[in-house]
Amino acid sequence: MTHVDVTIVLVAFSTACTIMMIGLGFLAFPGRAAAIWSSGFAVAMLSCYLLVAADQIDSSLVRAAAHGPILCASGFIWVGLRARRGREPIMLIPTITVFSVLTVALGLTAETDVYGLVFRVAFAVGAVVSGLAVSELVRLRRPELEMSLPLLVASVGFVGLALLVGIDGIIRWVNRQGGQTEADMSGLYALNELVALLYLVCALVTLLYLARRGSQSADPQQTPDFSTIARDRLARARAADDRWWSLLDIRLDDPGELLEASSGRAFQRVTTRFANDIRDVMPPEADLHAVSRTQVLVLLPRPDTAVRGLMSQLLERIGTFTDQQAVPVRLSASIGVAAAPLADWDLDRLRAAASDAAAHAQVSGGDRWERAVFAP
């Protein structure tokens, strides 16, 4: 396959990936991260079209500059992952600025011996942001981490390829082989474009999944540092022998089926109502933590009879059908409840026990609560 053939295939793939990311990702599940990732695919697509145009007009300047935007796309992936995790600043403007400068530098040095050095620097910067994207990917929750493996492997491969390109440059410098113009490096382009093909496909699989999962960060109305606050409350409760503390693991039943039966926006309205129902029912002194859009933990300082009453009230509220409901089905939830004294006021044991009880409630048909059982 010739270089031109590879470029044409890359154009087709980048166009298809951009359409799918925008249509199935951003438009169906609008959000800041999805918008950034869609922009990244659009930038990569623009780069591919510039490569085709450069071949048609035989312009080394356009061909050289076209490699900047496609490297910038890796930066958009990292920025989008930061946005999804709720990190501030997300570094969007610095990323665009750096790669814009590199794009201009690539174009201006295309016919000089400095181009080889500039290209390797740009490639190294792209590898750095890919490495940063890897650091964001490994922070994902377990189900999301499993689906991120395609992009994770592709990003690590990109870093490895950048190391090889850098080593090649060092060897040339040691052997005093002189600089390289854009024309001198044309042999690398076919390989780079094949790598770009693989990277685009892997990125589409992972980012489309993450975009449809929604934001990773918790609801900003929820407790910002649940683990620290909960551990402190439980430690003081233990010291005072305060036995009226429980941890609730509340899960929306059948989220996968609800997602398939609705649009992305409708599902977001369902999960928003789920979170609001919990917030409205639970007393002000309860600590809430959104594990995901369909799972919330509640640390509740109430006696056992009051906890049962609140759980019954919550299940009834979630299951109440309204005319304004986003999905025309009766919603339900499953709750696992673990009493703090039975876990020796240990948050990790409470979470594990409540999680098992909630899972058992869902397996048993949902729309119920189950009490955690602790081994003697």
Image (cartoon, rainbow, N blue to C red):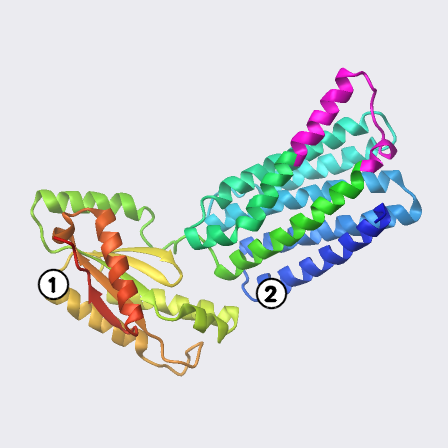
Amino acid type assigned to the residue bearing label 2 in the image: Leu
* Image spot of residue 251 (x, y percent): 32, 65
**Rendered view: 210 above or below 122:** below
* Image spot of residue 173 (x, y percent): 76, 18
At 65% from the left edge and 62% from the top edge, which residue is drawn? 20
**Rendered view: 55 above or below 373:** above
Report which residue position mark 2 lands on.
Answer: 24
Dot 1 lies on which element? helix
* Image spot of residue 286 (x, y percent): 22, 57
Amino acid type assigned to the residue bearing label 1 in the image: Asp
**Magenta highlight: main SS:** helix
Residue 173: in magenta span: yes
At 55% from the left edge and 45% from the top edge, which residue is drawn? 152
Say which label, 2 or 1, has the lower sequence index.
2
Dot 2 lies on which element? helix
Decide which of 103, 352 is in the foreground and name it: 352
| Cα–Cα gap, marks 2 and 1 | 46 Å
Dots 2, 1 in contact, CB < 8 A: no
Residue 346: in magenta span: no
At 12% from the left edge and 47% from the top edge, which residue is drawn? 237
Q: How many residues crowd mark 1 within 10 Å: few (<14), some (14–19), many (20+)?
A: some
Quarter location, residue 127 = top right
Decide which of 322, 139 is in the foreground and name it: 139
Q: Which disc, if any, is residue 236?
A: none
**Total number of numbered labels?**
2
Region of the chain picked out in magenta, as a range: 161-187
Left or right of residue 257, residue 246 in this image: left
Report which residue position mark 1 lands on.
Answer: 304
